[in-house]
Image (cartoon, rainbow, N blue to C red):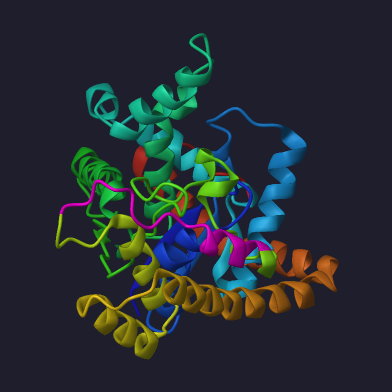
Amino acid sequence: MKNILSGIQPTGDLHIGNYFGAVQNWVRLQEEYNCFYGVVDYHSMTMPYKADQLRENTWKMVFYLLACGIKPENLFVQSLVPEHAELAWVLSCLTPYGELSRMTQFKDKTDQLKETDKEAFVSAGLFSYPVLQAADILIYHADYVPVGKDQEQHLELSRNIAQRFNFQFDKEYFRHPEPLFTETPKILSPADPSKKMSKSLGEKHYINLFGDEDRVRKQVKSAVTDTGDTPAGTMSPGVENLFEILRACGQLDAYTALMTDYKAGALRYSNLKETVADALAALTSAFRERLHTLHADKRAVKAQIQDSSAVIRKRAQQTLKEVREITGLLSMKV
C-alpha cells in the first residue's frame, strides 16, 4: 500500500470544520493506505505559547483523534520523533531563502500577530517551518499528502526540496509526494459566514466537536442566515453553510428534502436549523461517549501512543541513517 502523511497542530479544541475538512477523511484513508498521522507540537512552537498549555493541548488532541476513529498504531506525537527536527536542518541547507520568503502563510501569520501587537515577536521558526513540514512528509517517504488548496504551496516546496536533495547527491532517494485532493466541505463561521470557521476568531465562530449539546444547539439556532446583501436568486452564505454541515453529517435525505423546499421558496430557516442541530447533536454525542471511554484510562492511552510513536520512530531513524550516509555525516554509534 502507498504511504500517507498528515499532521495537525495541538491548538486546543477540535471543531467541526477540522473534522469535516480533514479528520473524517483521515479515518477513511486508513483502510486504503499506510497512514502516519502526527500531532505536530514542534509546529505549535512557532507562535507564542505557554509550555504547560502546549503539553496539555498535545495530549488533548491525541485523545480527540482517537475518539474520532484514528487508529492508535497510525498516530504519533512529533516531538517524540526528534529525527523530524534533524532532517529539517539537513533540508534547510538545501532550501533557498527566496523560496521560503514567498510562502504566503508566513506573511498571513505575521500579520495576525501584528494585529494585536505591532511590536510582536516573530520567530525564525515561523519563517522556516515549511522546511520542517517537508521533513515531516519526506522522513516517511510519503506518496500522498491529503491537503486543502491552501496547503498546496507548502507541498510544492516539499517536492522541490526532495528533487534538490536527489540532484545534489545524485541519488533518487526521496519520493516526490503528491497532493491527495478529496472532496471536503468548507465549513464557515456560524456567526460570520463570510469567514472560514476558526478558533482564532473567538468562541462564537466555531462549533466544538466535543462540545456540550446545549451549546451546539444554541450556536446553530443563532447562526446567521441572511445578511441582507445577498443577490436575488442566490443562496446566502449562511444558509449554504447550514446545508453544507447537514450534508457533511451524512443526512442526505433531510438535505434533499430541505433543498427541495428551498428551491420551491417554502423553506423555513427554523426547520433547517433544527435539522442541522439534531444532526450535529447525534454526531458530537457519539464522539463525547468515545472520549469519555478513553478518559477512563488515560494512563494506558498515553502509554499506547508513546509506544506507537516509538514504533513509528524506527522508520524515521532508518531514514536518518540513510540520509547521514548520503550527505556525508558521520554515522551514529548504536
Which stretch is magenta? Answer: 215-231
Residue 131: image x %, image y %? 38, 37
Q: Report the number of numbered marks.
A: 0
Is 188 magenta? The answer is no
Residue sitting at x 24%, y 43%: 153
Q: Name the image quarter holding residue 294.
A: bottom right
Residue sitting at x 42%, y 79%: 28
The residue sitting at the top extreme is: 119
Residue 48 relative to residue 177: left or right? right
Is 224 magenta? The answer is yes
Quarter of the picture holding the N terminus: bottom left
Residue 136 relative to residue 309: left or right? left
Residue 272 relative to residue 176: left or right? right
Q: Is residue 322 or residue 44 the one in the foreground? A: 44
Q: Name the image quarter holding residue 4.
A: bottom left
The residue sitting at the bottom extreme is: 253
Query: Could one spot residue 123 in this view of the protein?
Result: no
Residue 112: image x %, image y %? 44, 26
Residue sitting at x 65%, y 51%: 80
Q: Is residue 124 or residue 183 the one in the foreground? A: 183
